Image (cartoon, rainbow, N blue to C red):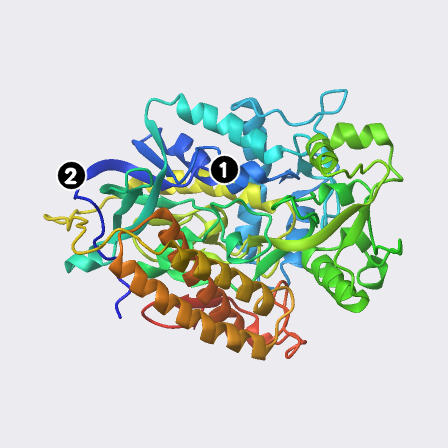
Amino acid sequence: MSTEPQSHSTHAERPEQTDYLVLGSGIAGLSFALRAAEHGRVLILTKHSSADSNTAWAQGGIAAVLDPHDSVDAHIQDTLTVGDGLCHPDVVAGYLRQAPAAVTELRERYGVRFDVTPDGEWALAREGGHSARRVAHAKDTTGQEIERGLLGAVLAHPHITVREGWMAVDLLNLAKYGGRAGCFGAYVLNTQSGQVQTILARATILATGGAGKVYLYTSNPDVATGDGVAMAYRAGAQIGNMEFFQFHPTCLYHPEAKSFLVSEALRGEGGVLKLRSGEAFMERYHPMKSLAPRDVVARAIDAELKRTGDDHVVLDMRHLPAEFLVERFPAIHARCMQYGIDMRSQPIPVVPAAHYSCGGVVTDIDGRTCVPNLFAIGEVAMTGLHGACRLASNSLLEGLVMGHRAADAVAQSEIDLPSQITPWISGDARDPNEAVVVTQNWDEVRRLMWNYVGIVRTDRRLERARRRIELIREEIREYYWDFKITSDLLELRNLALCAHLIIDCAQRRRESRGLHYNIDHLGKSDAYLRDTIVHRDFGPSAR
């Protein structure tokens, strides 16, 4: 059965035109918009509210060399080390050398209130995998503060329009009109009215974030459903390294604490991971102990939970001054207190959860994909910065620098629009009458990914996941064609495709490297010292 978009809406709208269509309102989309608005009109669409993004949930900070005693070369080396052989050195060097100026601009131009020392210098934290303190932060709500500063500037800009409650359905591609491939906009759904509109643009920018909701347990907000990766794949773009999904080692373990991250910055300030018995265990796994890279820490916790039968480990902060903990981590302290956990006198119960996708839409250093006039920036992109494992706090940095670079590169984008644009027409599609089909498949996708394609994998588990996801996707396709689209159905469709891509890439990498750990292939192999790239039409290839 075809997987092309069906025509489901109440009626066709007249196409709207803009210069740059941005899908997503996190740090990548906002930083792009502010720079691109200097040479064109920008339309930002976001599924929920403007501030509802992965960026706003980021606690720890943004990495950049801001201390004169630190060096960019050291930041580069730390990134390459954690990336486990798959980072692209030119991308790493390019982004990290731009980082200090880009982060400084956040403070000086957009009023982002980073923490400072009493004498006005940057207050810098250290996180896992870093050899120095180089993480700029705003208490433990850094992403929220960055979002506030950038969004305020965006909303005040005369050449930028932001629309909330709009979700992209699929990208428009010239190849469907008999020409050469090239993106010229998207079909977009008004999530309140159910109407689908056609928006034309000379460049389309995917800034849709990650796909953490593909897993049962995640630190991500509900919007992280892999929409950009799925749409790009359907449009013919290359997708790479989806097997490398980072599990954050420390999410709050409590039945009512949905998706609450306990920042790595707590370990950076001296927090110690322990078993429930009080025994510290990380020295058995890595010389950096509780500050080891995230993949090492997550696997260590997973191994200890399997060994002991416990349902969580703890993060002990009790040896640090109580006043310091409240001052440095006010949001985490307040949230823990809501659940009766006082980190000043009690260890914090934590477990790993899906956190960040190091794979995504393959781009060059400026965010260009292989589909002309389609850009991808931020977590949705696979640039080669992170390799097989992301260094802590390099994610906000990537979104910021990519936004700047893509805005400069996109200025020359031009496209010849088709003389007739196929409208989105409802046809015979019916109103949805079995929401349980969506909720059941949504739950099943997330559970099978957690159980079979999680922190530790095997060939048998991956094959089971592949067979089941194929059946689920077929059920979703039938439902998609029979009923009018809703945001829930679109997210499920995209989520299931992302699950398929993660499984596909994981089966192709028959070794253990970085975030991909398969106990049937424990060693590393030079044969896999390359990116795993899949393409809808042309199959896998090595980049």
Which is more foreground, mark 1 or mark 2?
2
Q: Residue 524, position in %: x, y?
A: 65, 74
State the image quarter where residue 478 is shown: bottom left
Residue 482 placement, left or right of 442: left
Q: Residue at x 36, y 44 (%)?
A: 205
The quarter of the image holding the N terminus is bottom left
Q: Residue at x 68, y 38 (%)?
A: 135
Q: Earlier in the sequence, mark 1 or mark 2?
A: 2
Q: Residue 404, position in %: x, y?
A: 45, 38
Q: Nearer the viewer, residue 256 or 356?
A: 256
Q: Farthest left residue?
A: 419
- Element marked by disc 1: helix
Q: Residues within 10 Å of mark 2 (few under 14, many from 20)?
A: few
Question: In this rendering, does residue 543 appear at all?
Answer: no
Question: In this rendering, does residue 376 appear at all?
Answer: yes
Q: Nearer the viewer, residue 77 or 180?
A: 180
Residue 516 placement, left or right of 499: right
Residue identifier under label 1: 27
Instruction: Residue type at mark 1: give it.
Output: Ile
Please say if 208 is above or below 165: below
Identify the disc placed on residue 14: 2
Q: Residue 94, position in %: x, y?
A: 53, 47
Identify the disc placed on residue 297: none
Instruction: Residue type at mark 2: give it.
Output: Arg
The quarter of the image holding the C terminus is bottom left
